[in-house]
Amino acid sequence: MSVSLSRQAVNRQFWRYVLPTVAAMLVSGLYQVVDGIFIGRHIGADGLAAINVAWPIAGVLYGLGMMVGVGAGALSTLSRGEGKLARARAQLGNGLVLMVLMAFGATALLWLLNEPALALQNAEGEVLALARDYLQVLLVAAPVALGSMALPFMLRNDEAPSRATQLIVVGAVTNILLDWVFIVELDWGLTGAALATSLAQLLVTILGIAHFFSARAQTRLTLADLKLRPYDAWRSCAIGFSSLLMYGYYSVVIGLHNALFLHYGDATVVGAYAIVSYLLAVYLLFAEGVATGTQPLISFHYGAGEYALMKRYIRRMLLVAVGSGVVALGLLNAFSTPVIHIFNNVDTHLIAATEHGLKLHLLALYLDGFIFCVGVIFQSFGASGKATGISLANMGIQLPFLLLLPHWLGLDGVWLALPISNIALTLVAGTLLWREWRRFAKA
């Protein structure tokens, strides 16, 4: 890896890692977006609202998966950058064991908490019934939900970004085909949507694990590497903890939005929020792909003490992630109606509510990408405290806006809480990054 990262042109290396990672992230997002399209067209606003109130629970699983995948992947890459190959293998093996233990612990915990979580979001009637249908399947399949999130990150850090993309494409295509069968042909509703997603995630998990025991793996594992090492487990969790906090933050914020929308509005508004969230997720997945694709490059050059090269990769990451957000915002505002029609083109109340929410909620779309990138930059340095601090600040800043603005502005206050808090958080994250940047200038 040291040869490929040190000698190839920076621009070429950046796109070599970023393009397949972006593709993988966007394809992985199809698990949720395709579900939303099928549900919006075949079940309607109640179905969209139901899957949205179920998401805060699912977000915990995805957050745990990302924590393990990012943490173990970053540790192993740092070790390889330092030339410690045996150590890198041990850290990846530890990550796989940790992934399994996390999955079973999360399953037990979420079985206890899912009903209170639905109640806190004011879910009732048809929305509550449909959400329960979805969660019954999802919680049984929790280990594969976590695994399908963690393993692509580990593959990318194994110098296999294209293979990680191929793996996720297979899962996404499987998910689409099963959605058609279970939702359209068999009319299984949200139970069918959950089954389609879980079976696709099972396939991704199996293929991902198999990679590390094959001849294709750069960091090829043996059964002897599959040991829980408490110190490495702690370091993996510490480095990736901000990713868990990020998903925890999303879960809390989405849950609060759902509760407030059901308080000030109805299930149609929550359905509109679900569509807007899918559109936001597409951009966030792109920005996450840019950031996580660049992470191995930043980690390697940081570990090797090559700070000038490292800073060039950081500049490209920020330019592509933030610039694409500006472009996405313009396109969504210009073509909002045809985009919304992808999810539902018959419910006029749902369409109108979605158009209104999109204009307000995504006002500062590109700042979401900047904030995520800054967190990944600190993860790449192994600076878990600062990465975690950004995630905590994200929660600390947005929640007051979310709780106060609706009292003054009603539904519009709920929609506007995100962009206003993003502006405030950007000032915090930007200051931290600038201080770090100046420190490297002196190195």
Image: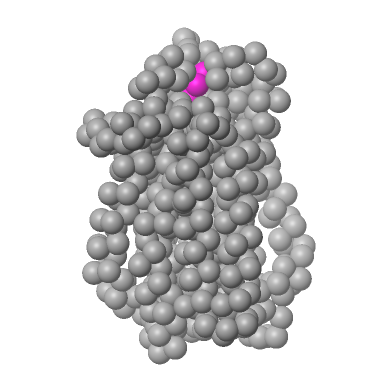
Which residue is rendered at x = 32% and y = 49% of the image?
A: 100
Residue 402 percent coordinates (x, y): 42, 63
**Predominant SS of the magenta segment:** helix
- Give the camera-side residue of 154 and 216: 216
As drawn, 405 above or below 394 = below
Q: Is residue 352 left or right of residue 28?
A: right
Q: Is residue 263 left or right of residue 168?
A: left
Residue 73 seen by the camera:
yes
Which residue is rendered at x = 61% and y = 18% of the image?
A: 4
Which residue is rendered at x = 37% and y = 74% of the image?
A: 136
Region of the chain picked out in magenta, as a range: 299-303
Q: Quadrant of the N terminus?
A: top right
Which residue is rendered at x = 74% and y = 72% of the image?
A: 337
As drawn, 271 above or below 145 = below
Q: Is residue 48 left or right of residue 162?
A: left
- Give the camera-side residue of 357 and 297: 297
In the rendered image, the residue lying farthest to the bottom is 125
- Give the camera-side residue of 157 and 318: 157
Residue 115 percent coordinates (x, y): 29, 75
* Colouring scheme, one of rainbow, by chain, secondary structure, one colour: one colour
- Give the camera-side residue of 266 and 90: 90
- Indicate the quadrant where residue 248 lies: bottom left
